[in-house]
Amino acid sequence: MIEIKNVTKIYGGKNKAVDGLSITIPTGEIVGFIGPNGAGKTTTIRMMTGVLTPDEGEILLNGTDIVKEPLNAKKQFGIVPDNADIFLRLKGIEYLNFMGDIYDVASSERKQRIEDMAKTFEMEHALNDKILSYSHGMRQKIVIMGALICDPDIWILDEPMTGLDPQSSFSLKQMMKQHAAKGKTVFFSTHVLEVAEKLCDKVAIINKGKILFFGTLEELRETYKSSDSLEEIFLEAIHHA
Ligand SMILES: Nc1ncnc2c1ncn2[C@@H]1O[C@H](COP(=O)(O)OP(=O)(O)OP(=O)(O)O)[C@@H](O)[C@H]1O
Ligand SMILES: [Mg+2]
């Protein structure tokens, strides 16, 4: 579970990127985070994962405060950040082992997970190449594999499908469903409303740092009776905010 309580982030003393935001992401459900460019999704995710410190409010990951107990809180989640261009000079396999070392993943488990994920994402033949030589989608895949190598309880993914081919995107969505079905937490941002519509149990719509709506798609359609399509509802919600 993720509890975000009245969180605010102000950049440069005046730009309120996140403004008194509160949501609780329950276990056993996939929650999608949608909103226009600059709405505050990445800023929220960076605060959830301890990259940025909130100016106000608190964030608990499985009950552990990310500011007060960062190490314990960080053991609860795996993060796929919005930028996959990391550790470019390492080979894929070196990066995965590095992540395995950080999270203390036993070598037999590690080997099995790498094997399984490499097969799923068709990365078996790329692991001995440097990440620098990878395509955009391959970088995204290695970052996803690195985030999941420790089998984290909570998955936090910032636009995870970006650059993935249809097969890999499908596989990731299946993995997200299986994780939630195990009673775990999955929170991800996306601009692809079709993905949100098909995959999510609940959606959170953010605009100008504030939550406009949080609930199931049925509740969303009840609130905005004007249309059935998530795209039209989204545009209406944003423009009438
Ligand atoms: N490091 C920073 N310094 C100053 N302002 C920032 C910084 N990062 C983000 N912002 C501002 O904060 C606001 C929210 O940005 P954020 O990256 O959280 O949006 P987002 O919802 O993730 O957008 P996108 O859909 O484009 O990824 C924007 O107005 C942005 O200009
Ligand atoms: Mg973003």
Image: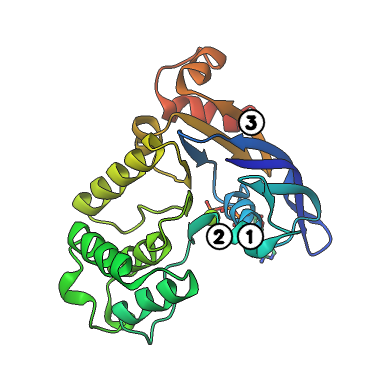
Q: Residues within 10 Å of mark 3 (few under 14, many from 20)?
A: some
> For the residue with label 2, is its CB less than 8 Å from the closest atom of ligand 2?
no
* Kind of residue sitting beneath label 2: Lys
Residue under numbered circle 1? 72
What count of labels does the image hold?
A: 3
**Residue nearer the viewer, 134 or 119:** 119
In the picture, the quarter occupied by the N terminus is top right
**Residue at coordinates 36% horizontally, 73% vertically from top-left?**
96
The CA distance from mark 3 to mark 2 is: 30 Å
| Secondary structure type for disc 2 | loop
The CA distance from mark 3 to mark 1 is: 31 Å
**Residue nearer the viewer, 236 or 103:** 103
Front disc: 3 or 1: 1
Q: Residues within 10 Å of mark 2 (few under 14, many from 20)?
A: some
| Secondary structure type for disc 1 | helix
Q: Is residue 148 left or right of residue 206?
A: left
In the depicted structure, whether residue 142 falls above or below residue 210: below
Q: Position of residue 239 (x, y in %)?
A: 60, 31
User: Are circles 3 and 1 on residues that touch, CB within 8 Å?
Assistant: no
User: Are circles 1 and 2 on residues that touch, CB within 8 Å?
Assistant: yes
Front disc: 3 or 2: 2
Q: Is residue 136 left or right of residue 80?
A: left
In the depicted structure, whether residue 108 falls above or below residue 3: below
In the picture, the quarter occupied by the C terminus is top right
In the depicted structure, whether residue 223 falls above or below residue 22: above
Q: Earlier in the sequence, mark 3 or mark 1?
A: 1
Residue under numbered circle 2? 75
Q: Position of residue 102 (x, y in %)?
A: 49, 74
Residue under numbered circle 3? 212
Q: Quadrant of ligand 2?
A: bottom right
| Secondary structure type for disc 3 | strand
